[in-house]
């Protein structure tokens, strides 16, 4: 596994008796290491082995059996093994059903392969959807997926974080970034939002390997993207009570202060003023705007930070 593999995944595999070797920045480098350093062992590709692809196809069969009226199936793409199997099964049984792939913008390896006509490196940078961070799609999977997948879209890190947050809040489900990628595509702000009105859409939530510490950061990012966690700077008097007055004014609007820090040295204001950097929790965009307008009306010079 790569160094970036979630600790929970590593430990669970070790409990099953696996000898886990951590090597490489992503699954591609881990694969290269395994094939180079352990040539006496057979490498079973988790996203390009024909039998694993066939096994993934059983999910497509189950979707049709459990939701026979489904119109659209959205499938996360990493190495393309899952979507290859699912699309093959679905298109064989019900060709009219749309099968659409979703991958993170930071590692859009399937889109890169479609553009080039063959698997190429699509890794740009790390992603919250670490389970989908496969730099080059499997050649076997690509041949199958290219034939049966209707098209694919990319989702931003912001939308992946929001999708994880929505699943926790509304469904009480803990899903990793890769597992929530398909949902991210149809949420407001996603590339497929509003496209399937009146249709039955299936979104598989495939993956729950996320560390508790990472989950906390993802939740914070989701709240920030939702504008329920905002950051701004306000200039106040450096005399006793300056920060207290700002805190009272924020309390009047009903926000909760999560973090506060005051800066005396690196600023351009008068010597008797300081800049207060605040991180506060609100109920959403409207509440955030109300707070900032209220403070500006009170005479505070405000610098807004955007997500």
Image (cartoon, grey):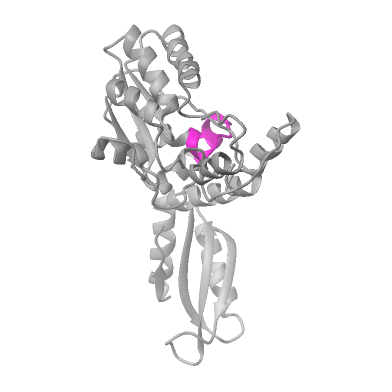
The quarter holding residue 176 reads top right
Residue 177 image position (x, y, % from top left): 50, 40
Front-most of 224 and 158?
Answer: 158
Identified at 36% across, 40% down, the residue is 109
Residue beneath the point at 62% across and 32% down: 41
For this orientation, the residue located farthest to the bottom is 271
* Above or below: residue 241 compared with residue 307: below
User: Residue drawn at (54%, 51%), measured in percent from left and top?
Assistant: 220
The image shows residue 92 at horizontal and vertical percentages of: 33, 9
Q: In this view, does 104 lie to the left or right of 95?
A: right
Q: Nearer the viewer, residue 81 or 283?
A: 81
Q: Is residue 193 above or below residue 149?
A: below
Q: In which quarter of the image is the C terminus?
A: bottom left
Quadrant for the N terminus, please.
Answer: top right
Considering depth in this image, is 43 or 186 the residue closer to the camera?
A: 43
- Choose top left, top right, bottom left or bottom right for residue 259: bottom right
Q: In this view, does 118 lie to the left or right of 162?
A: left
Q: Is 174 covered by the magenta stretch?
A: yes
Residue 191 shows in the view: no
Numbered circles on residues, count? 0
Q: In the image, which residues are magenta? A: 165-179
Magenta segment: does it hold 67? no
Q: Is residue 150 visible?
A: yes
Magenta region, main secondary structure = helix
* Residue 123 spot, x, y in % from top left: 40, 48
């Amino acid at each position: 596994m790569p160094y970036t593999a979630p600790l929970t995944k590593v430990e669970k595999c070790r409990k099953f008796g696996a000898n886990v070797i951590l090597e490489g920045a992503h699954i591609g480098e881990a694969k290269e290491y395994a094939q180079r350093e352990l040539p006496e062992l057979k490498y079973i590709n988790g996203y390009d082995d024909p039998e694993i692809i066939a096994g993934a196809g059983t999910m497509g069969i189950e979707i049709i059996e459990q939701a026979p009226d489904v119109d659209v199936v959205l499938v996360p793409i990493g190495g393309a093994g899952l979507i290859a199997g699912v699309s093959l099964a679905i298109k064989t049984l019900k060709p009219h059903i749309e099968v659409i792939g979703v991958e993170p913008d930071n590692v859009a390896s399937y889109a890169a392969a479609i553009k080039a006509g063959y698997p190429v490196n699509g890794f740009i940078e790390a992603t919250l959807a670490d389970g989908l961070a496969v730099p080059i799609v499997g050649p076997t999977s690509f041949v199958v997926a290219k034939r049966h997948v209707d098209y694919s879209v990319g989702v931003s890190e912001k939308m992946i974080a929001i999708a994880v947050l929505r699943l926790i809040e509304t469904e009480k489900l803990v899903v990793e970034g890769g597992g929530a990628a398909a949902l991210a595509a149809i949420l407001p702000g996603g590339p497929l939002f509003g496209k399937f009105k009146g249709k039955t859409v299936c979104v598989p939530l495939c993956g729950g390997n996320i560390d508790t510490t990472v989950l906390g950061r993802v939740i914070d990012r989701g709240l920030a993207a939702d504008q329920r966690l905002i950051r701004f700077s306000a200039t106040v008097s450096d005399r006793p009570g300056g920060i207290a007055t700002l805190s009272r004014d924020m309390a009047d609007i009903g926000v909760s202060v999560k973090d506060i820090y005051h800066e005396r040295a690196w600023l351009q204001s008068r010597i008797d003023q300081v800049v207060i950097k605040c991180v506060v929790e609100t109920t959403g965009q409207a509440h955030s705007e109300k707070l900032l307008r209220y403070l500006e009306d009170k005479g505070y010079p405000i610098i807004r930070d955007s997500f």
